Image (cartoon, rainbow, N blue to C red):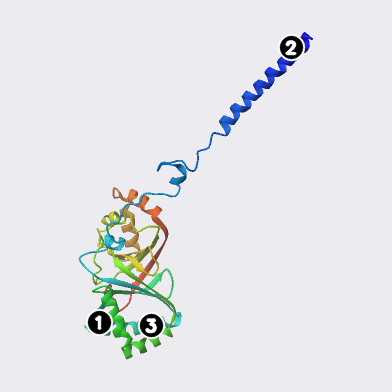
């Protein structure tokens, strides 16, 4: 009987040890969950959805664009039928010259190019409307009532595969795009961004030695969060040397490091000015 009692007590002690061990494992593997209703702004569930946002003092475009001018820019991309490119360029020269001479139209061509490297058989035009949106509206109203211009559009339409445009504002920290004598090749680097803030304002100071910076613009209507940087070089070798020299300047590497994460995609076009382009 004594042996039986001892055996029973040993089984009881083993069972108690197993129960205590199981409870300890539960405490380690399955900690007590926090409740969704936990109060306080630092609750983990609340933090998944609530983020503090700094109050904006003004529209984003007003913070980035130049305040001393009220110019609006339009970028046109025309994809031309390959067999029609020469005729298209001649027609554009004729119309652009007429618009430049006519003081009743508050618009001017900043530059016109054909793409050399990038999308082929493409024409790119940059227009300036001094006076902003009212100037754009005035110009469009007058052109819609211009019989000669309507005939030009009909003739041009026969030469095009597709066309696209964007309305742009000019970055406050970039140069004013002024006429250049040339000869030059032009590079337009287009960035599709996650945000339009970043280190781009800081970057431009590293690229001013050879007067290669022409203009910088960001989209207002069309594809949004798009930035265009326009550069001028003597030739492709000059472009290579100028871009490489930027890496020798202190701070350029960190500027690139912090800017790249803001970019969704980017594109580079090498362009040749047309005969009538003020930027040669």
Q: Earlier in the sequence, mark 3 or mark 1?
A: 3
Residue at image location 39% in from the left, 49% down from the top: 51
How packed is label 1: few (under 14 Cα within 10 Å), some, or many (20 or more)? some
How packed is label 2: few (under 14 Cα within 10 Å), some, or many (20 or more)? few
Residue at image location 46% in from the left, 42% down from the top: 44
Label for residue 105?
A: 1
Label for residue 88?
A: 3
Displayed quadrant of residue 246: bottom left
State how far apart marks 2 and 3 are (Cα).
108 Å
Quadrant where the image shows the N terminus: top right
How packed is label 3: few (under 14 Cα within 10 Å), some, or many (20 or more)? some
Which residue is disc 2 drawn over?
Answer: 6
Can the viewer see residue 202 in this picture?
Answer: yes
Residue projecting furthest to the right: 1
Which is closer to the viewer, label 3 or label 1? 1
Is 200 or 91 nearer to us in this picture?
A: 200
Residue projecting furthest to the top: 2
Counting from the top left corner in percent of width and height, residue 90 is at: 34, 84
Is 213 or 64 nearer to us in this picture?
A: 64
Disc 2 is placed on an element classified as: helix
Residue projecting furthest to the left: 68
Q: Earlier in the sequence, mark 2 or mark 1?
A: 2
Task: Say above or below: 59 vs 275.
Answer: above
Residue at image location 46% in from the left, 40% down from the top: 38
Which is closer to the viewer, label 2 or label 3? 2
Quadrant where the image shows the C terminus: bottom left
Label for residue 205?
A: none
Disc 3 is placed on an element classified as: helix
């Amino acid at each position: 009987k004594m042996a039986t009692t001892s055996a029973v007590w040993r089984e009881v002690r083993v069972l108690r040890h197993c129960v205590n061990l199981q409870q300890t494992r539960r405490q380690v593997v399955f900690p007590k969950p926090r409740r969704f209703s936990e109060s306080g702004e630092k609750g983990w569930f609340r933090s998944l959805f609530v983020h503090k946002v700094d109050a904006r003092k003004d529209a984003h475009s007003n913070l980035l664009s130049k305040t001393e001018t009220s110019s609006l820019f339009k970028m046109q991309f025309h994809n031309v039928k390959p067999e029609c490119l020469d005729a298209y360029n001649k027609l554009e020269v004729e119309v652009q010259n007429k618009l430049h001479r006519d003081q009743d139209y508050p618009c001017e061509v900043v530059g016109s190019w054909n793409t050399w490297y990038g999308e082929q058989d493409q024409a790119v035009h940059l227009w300036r409307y001094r006076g902003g949106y009212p100037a754009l509206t005035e110009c469009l109203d007058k052109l819609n009532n211009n019989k000669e211009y309507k005939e030009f559009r009909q003739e041009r339409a026969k030469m095009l595969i597709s066309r696209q445009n964007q309305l742009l504002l000019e970055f406050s920290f970039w140069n004013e795009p002024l006429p250049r004598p040339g000869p030059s090749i032009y590079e337009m680097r287009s960035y599709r961004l996650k945000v339009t803030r970043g280190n781009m304002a800081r970057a431009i100071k590293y690229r001013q030695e050879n007067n290669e910076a022409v203009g910088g613009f960001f989209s207002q209507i069309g594809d949004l969060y798009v930035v265009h940087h326009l550069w001028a070089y003597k030739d492709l070798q000059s472009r290579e040397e100028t871009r490489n020299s930027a890496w020798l300047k202190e701070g350029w590497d960190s500027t690139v490091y912090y800017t790249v994460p803001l970019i969704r995609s980017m594109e580079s076009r090498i362009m040749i000015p047309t005969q009538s382009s003020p930027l040669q």
